[in-house]
Image: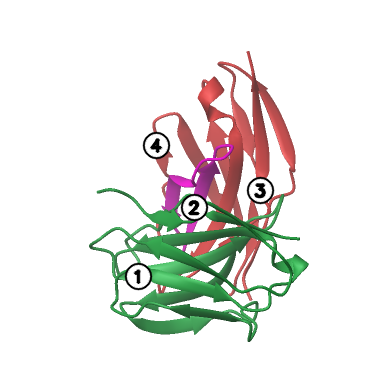
Chain colours: A red, B green
Amino acid sequence: AQTVTQSQPEMSVQEAETVTLSCTYDTSESDYYLFWYKQPPSRQMILVIRQEAYKQQNATENRFSVNFQKAAKSFSLKISDSQLGDAAMYFCAYRDGYGNKLVFGAGTILRVKS
Amino acid sequence: DTGVSQDPRHKITKRGQNVTFRCDPISEHNRLYWYRQTLGQGPEFLTYFQNEAQLEKSRLLSDRFSAERPKGSFSTLEIQRTEQGDSAMYLCASSRGGVLYEQYFGPGTRLTVT
């Protein structure tokens, strides 16, 4: 079974600084997708960024980028120029190549200090 | 695109009672997913539908849980004889079919069993 591990229960960052959230996963599949989701307090989960395992190039979305290390099964999220609105719970998630269920990590709470 | 909606948003029930939750997916999405999220944890997959067919059920979905999607549109999740361990946030998500499409999450139904 696939597993996703987020080893940082909580992280803090100063506004305008950069922070990196860690994620490792375990799978025997070669075709899969990785995601970072953001869940603000009392609000619904939204997709931040996705990475296809077959792509070597790291995904980027504005201030959000990933460092995908397939051999190491590592998938970290970098948030640049952190903003107060980035404060949320961040979940790393895995989905196999069939496009069905998501497997989530336990999450990392990100606090942004002004 | 009105987003995924869930009803009710909050439910408090006494142990042993039955509860039913409803999810309305984004209209053109043929896949619908149910997840359960306990406090401080990531969501865990329960079940998913493609149109009206229930294609996968997690071992977490005990005999007391049943989900339906009768006409391939909205879905209901019923929990019979609720237990305190059922207290959680129940999340619904929907997507188009295929691996290229992301899952969009609803706001969730928070269940408290007293």
The answer as to whether the residues below labels 4 and 2 share one chain is: yes
Q: CA distance from mark 4 to mark 1?
A: 26 Å
Residue depicted at x 66% and y 73%: B17
Residue B35, horizontal then vertical, whole percent: 55, 65
The chain ID associated with circle 2 is A
Horizontal side, residue B37 vs residue A63: left or right:
right
Identify the mark nearer the N-term, 4 or 2.
Answer: 2
Residue depicted at x 54% and y 75%: B78
Q: Quadrant of residue A73?
A: bottom right
Q: Amino acid at mark 1?
A: Arg
Helix, strand or loop at disc 3?
loop
The chain ID associated with circle 4 is A
Residue A102, horizontal then vertical, whole percent: 51, 64
**Residue at image mark 3:** A107
Query: Can you tell which of label 4 and label 3 is closer to the viewer?
Result: 3
Q: Where A36 sits versus B75, above or below?
A: above
Q: CA distance from mark 3 to mark 1?
A: 25 Å
Label annotation for residue B31: 1
The chain ID associated with circle 3 is A
What is the span of residues highlighted in magenta in the rendered image? A32-52
Q: Quadrant of residue B62?
A: bottom right
The answer as to whether the residues below labels 3 and 1 share one chain is: no
